[in-house]
Amino acid sequence: MTDIAPVVLPVHGSPDWEQFTADYVAQRLSLSTALLEQIRSDTTDDVLAAWNDADIAVDQAATLVETLTEVHPDPDVRSRATALLHEVDAFRSARDGDPALYHAIEKRLVATDDRTRHLRELVLRDFRLQGAHLDDDARRTVAQLSEQISAATTEFADNIREDVGSIRVPLSALADMPADYIEAHAPDAEGFVTITTDYPDLVPILDMCSDRAVREALMRADYERAPANDEVLARLLHLRHDKARALGFEGWPDYATAPMMMTDGAGIESFLSDVAAAALPAGKADADVILARLREDHPDAESVLVSDSRYYLETLKAERYGVDGRLLRQYFDYSRVRDGILALAGDLFELEFRPVAEAPRWHGDVEVYDVHARGHHVGGSRTGDDRVGRIHLDMHPREGKYGHMACFGVVGGIADRYLPESALVCNFPRGKMTFDDLETFLHEFGHLMHAILSGNGEYARLAGLSERGEWDFVEAPSQLLEDWAYSHDVLRRFAVNDEGEEIPENLVEGLRASRDFGEGLLTCRQLVYAQMSYRLHRDVPEDIEAAASAIEREFDVRTPLTGTHQYRSFGHLTTYSACYYTYQWSLAIAKDLATGFDRENLLDPERAHRYRDTVLAPGGSKPAADLIADFLGRPFSSEAYADWLASLSK
């Protein structure tokens, strides 16, 4: 079979990026326009094929430009991509709100099997969620609101990305930091060091710096980024509420959960209430343990600040379990971790990652690999040693780049037509990483594998990571893959220090023993984010600062940093809107999926291959509940998650 070529991007530093991006979008929107007109005018015999081709074109346009807004080093290209993303979003909103298309699809898109019936139901629901079934005035209102929501969403994200905070501290304040960290932060003429809120600066300070004032100052700088987002978020909350009401929903949480496994906004509230009942007692117990240890260093401490917890959790893990973050870092060199995770994924899923040195890329730091199957079917079509995808690893921070960790699409895969391409966009140090970094790498790589392995379906609407899919399931494969960080059989393959010594088994045993230590406190923090996401959209408060502070006081077991506004830089308020509950929901799924593996042999190929074929490769071709049942041989159960939550209080 003929190999499918990847998209041809301009080379790094080329002046052609702006023109390439504009042409790329224009060509795809033009193609989609022509195909949709055939459906409207009843001049095509195959409505399903025409709709799918039009959908593929729009998805391709949106996917690439959204990624470029976050990663391209040239601010002019990012600005151009942002404008084009608005154009694509407006096009898609107009398409999904078009009553002529809606009625044509409803009348003439014929389902021939379970998969196409599922697709038809989803497409018609997409139309209704954009108001295609409403009268002219109502549709115009929804269309205007959708356009304004898109603009506000991009503005919120841009403000976060462009605002990196920093503090200046005397070099002496870093005396107990690892040598390589100090070497990477040369003091200025006055003997002061600048520490930024970028992850490679921020995380080691919060984990390892004994100077309490430095930790607090850096966290304050992080929490005070993007002040313009106060106004943007207020506007966005009102726009979303108005759109939901115009479509007949009680509010945005009900609208946002319409494509989800979760039933509605009330379901979010009930689920989070159950989590809080189990997590708060455990969280308060964790906070008491941390406070007692904090008072050994600071006898006058009255409470645990949010800037204290990471440092003292790491300290207590070292003292109780022998898990010292400084000691661990020597085993997690970025290059070895990268190669080790590629090899691990290769063995689990029968893949091979081949570096492509000559591949064009948007920045010189980006590492490109072609993904090849090793003698198996991927999604039921390609076989043998075929190329099944391409990945772009953009792993280190730089000015103007997305500041967190995420998997972004480049091209959505379609069987025998388009090669799936995705980018891992992270902000890891170039040298030694923390164990948390390793877990995060595995988590995000789970998204990457989901995107590549599900990229061999026939229909764009059923893609594995479709933004219109069941987003409360999408974190589960990533959270599941974190388990592999706690296996000595896995870590010994790449967790090696500069002298070539592998990570000791007793150290990994300590990691396993300490894994749930502090999880009550950390789950409470996740509740803060989830409740903030849900309640801000449920209530649309006039005073966002007061509402956010009240949520922190109710669910966080630590003392907040007074006068800070973390919600301004909480990027998931745009991507997840009211649905940040998904991290705990999908954790419940991940705990259940984990029961399908042998905990003593996570490298067992038979179970990994079944998981690949039943959960990852099908993408959105079935409801997520069916994928879980296909793998486990029974319906999804929250029993493993409930048992885990209960164990945190023991």
Image (cartoon, grey):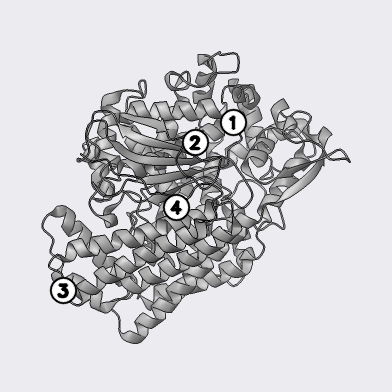
Q: Position of residue 250 (x, y in %)?
A: 39, 72
Asked if residue 472 is positioned above or below residue 540 in the image, the reply reads above
- Expressed as whole percent of the image width and height from the top left, the position of residue 256 reads 39, 63
| SS type, badge 1 | loop
| Location of residue 190 in the rendering, given as x and y in whole percent from the top left corner | 89, 41
Q: Amino acid at mark 4?
A: Tyr
Q: Residues within 10 Å of mark 2 (few under 14, many from 20)?
A: many
Q: CA distance from mark 1 to mark 4?
A: 29 Å
**Would you name the residue on which mark 1 appears?**
433
Residue 374 vs 555, above or below: the answer is above
Instruction: Pick out the residue farthest to the left.
Output: 112
Earlier residue among tags 4 and 3: 3
Residue 628 visible? The answer is yes
Q: Quick one: SS at disc 3?
A: loop
Q: Along the polypeptide, which appears first: circle 2 or circle 4?
A: 2
Instruction: Work out whether residue 641 or residue 628 is closer to the camera in this orientation and state it.
Output: 628
Which residue position holds label 2? 441
| Dot 1 and dot 2 residues touching (CB under 8 Å) | yes
> Of marks 1 and 2, which one's residue comes earlier in the chain?
1
Q: Earlier in the sequence, mark 2 or mark 3?
A: 3
Amino acid at the residue labelled 3: Thr
Asked whether disc 1 touches disc 4, contact meaning CB atoms under 8 Å apart, the reply is no
Crowd rating for badge 3 (residues with CA inside 10 Å; few <14, some 14–19, many 20+): few
Q: Which residue is mark 3?
A: 43
Q: Residue lying farthest front?
A: 15
Secondary structure at badge 4 equals loop
* 437 or 597: nearer the viewer: 437
Extreme right residue here?
190
